[in-house]
Amino acid sequence: MAALLALTTGSASSFATGMTSLAQATTYTRLEEAPLDTAPFSAGSGVVVHPVASRVVHAWPGGPPVAELPSLQLGNPTWVPVVETTPGWIRVLLPSRPNRATGWISGDRGDLQIARTPYLITVETSARRLTVFESGRTAGQWTVAVGAPKTPTPLGRTFLLASLLPSGKDAGDLVMPTGAHSATLDSYGGGPGTVAFHGWPDTSVFGKAVSHGCVRVPDDALHTLSRVPLGTLVIITR
């Protein structure tokens, strides 16, 4: 399996809901005007939102539009974590480059679903350790493989973007892309360099820094991750 996800489900424009001149906030796009996350290692509140219909993303509350957040990502419903609020506005993490891109969307609940996930995922790259927390308690901890020195797993907070299982495959082939991208590879295997959690057939890689940026995990870790809601924060540290 390619170390960085080869996302072959279409281009960025295929995720638009209707014609628009705004860029789509997907894993395929770069949003230069999007403000960066100012608290990249905060565990947040667990609040996640799903735009039932596309939402315009602004650089600041009431500021200029920078993108449109579609209701679907990679065939999955778009769920993104809330990192800040102000009356009438919600700041969310985005799945686009650059890493830690954020944007503000209207807090109008007319076509916005709001939920709270009890989960938090952490990856400690130096320790090669993945931990899944549920309601503040450790639900599982595993030794994993992370990015090699020349293709490191990017640090900061991101989120579970989608859950992809190729047709006819078993659960061991599940790929869970995040909202982060390789800082050293613009693309890999035909995809946009999206960092993902996925399994690996050779267990000798666990505990090593050998991937192209993805986090390779044991099968039981992948099974646990498969139960974690989309939009859940992933915090990657040294």
Image (cartoon, grey):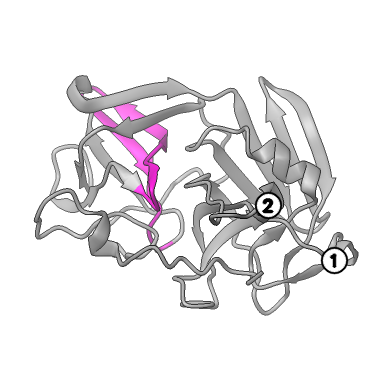
- Location of residue 223 by image quarter: top right
Report the front residue among 219 and 138. Answer: 219
Q: What residue does disc 1 label?
A: 202
Query: Residue 200 placed where, x, y %?
Result: 76, 62
Q: Residue at x 53, y 46 (%)?
A: 163
For marks 1 and 2, the one nearer the N-term is: 1
Q: What element carries label 2?
A: strand
Q: Which residue is drawn at 32% across and 24% down?
A: 113
Q: Mark 2 points at which residue?
A: 237
Which circle, 1 or 2, is nearer the viewer?
A: 1
The amino acid type found where label 2 is placed reads: Thr
Q: Taking 45 as reference, is 102 left or right? A: left
Q: Which residue lies furthest to the front in this view?
A: 168
Tell me: 51 left or right of 161. Answer: left
Q: Which amino acid does label 1 sit on?
A: Asp
Q: Is mark 1 on a helix, strand or loop?
A: loop
User: What is the spatial separation of the Cα atoms under label 1 and label 2, in whole angstroms?
Assistant: 25 Å
Can you give x and y, in whole percent of width and height, for residue 35 in the image?
A: 32, 53
Question: Which quarter of the rendered picture does the C terminus lie within?
Answer: bottom right
Residue at 55 percent across and 39 percent down: it is 233
Image: magenta residue range? 73-98
Q: In this view, does 99 lie to the left or right of 102?
A: right
- Give residue 235's quadrant in the image: top right
Q: Identify the residue shown where x is 54% and y is 69%.
A: 182
Residue 149 image point, x, y percent:
72, 75
